[in-house]
Image (cartoon, grey):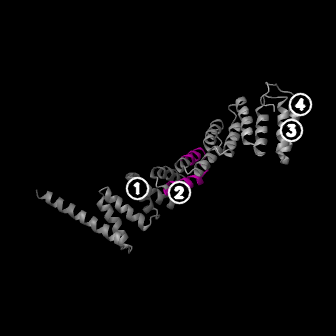
Amino acid sequence: NGQDAAPVQFDSRALSHYLDGDLYMLQGDYRKAAASYEMALRFDTTSATIYLGLAEALLNDGRPKVSFKAAERAQQLEPEDPRVYQFLARNAIARNDNSAAIDYLDKWALYDPENIDPLFKKAAIFIGLKRFEEAIDTYLIIYDKDPSQRHVLERAGEMALSLGDLERAYQTYQRLSKALPDDGAVARTFAEITLRSERHEEALKVFEWLVETGNATVTTRLQLAWLYRRLDRLSDSQAVLNSLLDDGQRQWDVLSMAGQVASQLDDYRQLEIGRAHV
């Protein structure tokens, strides 16, 4: 079929058969297209483009294994052509070889570094395989390459939170908070993530911003009070809790923490009085 023939340098007759193959592809007659590309290879076996055309026709004709051999020949001729790896990835997916597909997508991304399509396809494979952590990591790479793809951060954040993966949730929402600095909902989620992951100083800045800008909910303000208490800033904690009480927030958790903080402050005051008399 021309694939195994000895190398034949370019012959102008190859072009006519190649164009016939392209025409048959447009018409959806993949068997005739494959025959035309094979005829073109009788006159030129050095063209990766012809081999790729043949591989495409064979794949569309339902012959992925034979198609793969033609694409391999194209790879040998043009080992750094991203088009080759784009096709090889599609072929691997058609053969249900996800591992090979991921490898080819990595090669495609390597030789076409500005193109984020291979990364999107790689993330889709990871999701299909339920390898969600790797999907999230791939989404973060996509965003770092192209910050206009903000939707991938939102998707990655949802996945990380559903997995309970605080580190990946942090990496995602840290980027989101920078991309959307005035978004209260994003900031509240980021604040909670930083709090749960014990990044207390960073969490404090976000919580304080939420209160200052009027983006804090009752829960947010209670979390800030807890954080102040955790950092031994009891007077600040009491001030937040008093503001909640002044607003009529007398739920059990508010009253309980207010009592605990007041008790601690009283203990400290008594301790200071005792020291003053020593």
Residue 105 vs residue 134: left or right?
right
Q: Amino acid at mark 1?
A: Arg
The residue located at (39%, 73%) in the rendering is 247
Task: Tell me the distance, in whole angstroms, between the alpha carbons under discs 3 and 1.
Answer: 62 Å
Task: Tell me the distance, in whole angstroms, between the alpha carbons under discs 4 and 2.
Answer: 56 Å
Residue 272 vs residue 13: left or right?
left
Element on which disc 3 rests: helix
Task: Tell me the distance, in whole angstroms, between the alpha carbons under discs 1 and 2.
Answer: 16 Å
Mark whose residue sits in front, 4 or 2: 4
Check disc 1 and report the residue beneath it: 196
Quadrant of res 58: top right
Residues in magenta?
137-162
Q: Is residue 149 magenta?
A: yes
Q: Which label is found at residue 150?
A: none
Mark whose residue sits in front, 3 or 1: 3
Check disc 2 and report the residue beneath it: 158
| 197 vs 214, nearest the viewer | 197
Task: Tell me the distance, in whole angstroms, between the alpha carbons under discs 2 and 3.
Answer: 48 Å
The residue located at (86%, 43%) in the rendering is 23
